[in-house]
Image (cartoon, rainbow, N blue to C red):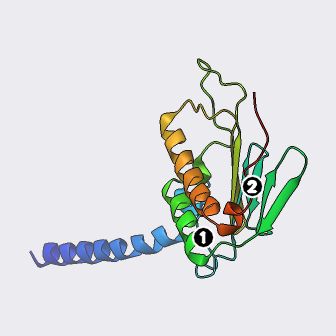
């Protein structure tokens, strides 16, 4: 009887030591390329307070462009181009950053697939490029008639938030409307 009791005690002790060692082995396992843990987070800012590694660029039909890189807004007229300089505040960058993250902008397709059952002529394009740290993602919409409604909603949220901020700037409001006409 004492032999069996001793044997059970040895087995239990070995089993407990084995359970403790499993944690050591789990830590030693390196993530594979398919493991999500090894994929860098494109939304990680190295300087979240000042947003120094966060850039926004938009281009609307090559008529209106803005870039936080040089803080310049450009509007094209029939005979010239006018530009004004202004930066975005930390709060404005924070709002755009929040929407970019919420809509998972970096996982939108680079070119939005348009519907082929309807056509608008001329069509108006929008290009938005976001840079966060070393990660840059550009999304191009050539038609305003996006096939996938969920993707369209995400893209429009980002586009609308940027437009609201830019077009409320006094520098932009002070520019005359473009005189370009599309037929």
Q: Residue furthest left?
A: 1
Q: Is residue 161 above or below residue 63?
A: below
Q: Is residue 46 above or below residue 57?
A: below
Residue 92 in the figure: left or right of residue 81: left
Residue at 60 percent across and 58 percent down: it is: 162
First in sequence: mark 2 vs mark 1: 1
Residue 93 in the figure: left or right of residue 125: left
Q: Secondary structure at mark 1?
A: helix
Q: Quadrant of residue 2?
A: bottom left
Quarter that holds the N terminus: bottom left
Quarter that holds the C terminus: top right
Q: Is residue 115 above or below residue 28?
A: above
Q: Residues within 10 Å of mark 2 (few under 14, many from 20)?
A: few
Q: Which mark is residue 131?
A: none
Q: Residues within 10 Å of mark 1 (few under 14, many from 20)?
A: many
Q: Residue furthest right?
A: 79
Residue at 16 percent across and 76 percent down: it is: 3
Residue receiving disc 2: 176
Residue 116 in the figure: left or right of residue 174: left
Residue receiving disc 1: 93
Q: Secondary structure at mark 2?
A: loop
């Amino acid at each position: 009887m004492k032999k069996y009791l001793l044997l059970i005690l040895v087995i239990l002790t070995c089993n407990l030591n084995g359970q403790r060692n499993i944690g050591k082995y789990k830590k030693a396992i390196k993530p594979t390329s398919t493991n999500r843990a090894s994929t860098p987070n494109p939304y990680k800012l190295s300087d979240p307070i000042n947003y120094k590694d966060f850039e926004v660029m938009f281009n609307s039909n090559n008529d209106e462009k803005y870039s936080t890189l040089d803080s310049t807004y450009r509007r094209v007229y029939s005979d010239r181009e006018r530009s004004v300089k202004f930066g975005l505040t930390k709060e404005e960058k924070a709002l755009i950053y929040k929407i970019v993250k919420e809509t998972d902008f970096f996982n939108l397709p680079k070119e939005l697939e348009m519907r082929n059952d309807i056509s608008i002529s001329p069509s108006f394009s929008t290009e938005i490029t976001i840079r966060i740290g070393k990660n840059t993602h550009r999304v191009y919409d050539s038609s305003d008639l996006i096939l996938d409604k969920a993707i369209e909603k995400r893209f429009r949220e980002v586009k609308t938030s940027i437009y609201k901020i830019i077009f409320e700037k006094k520098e932009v409001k002070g520019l005359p409307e473009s005189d370009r006409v599309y037929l």
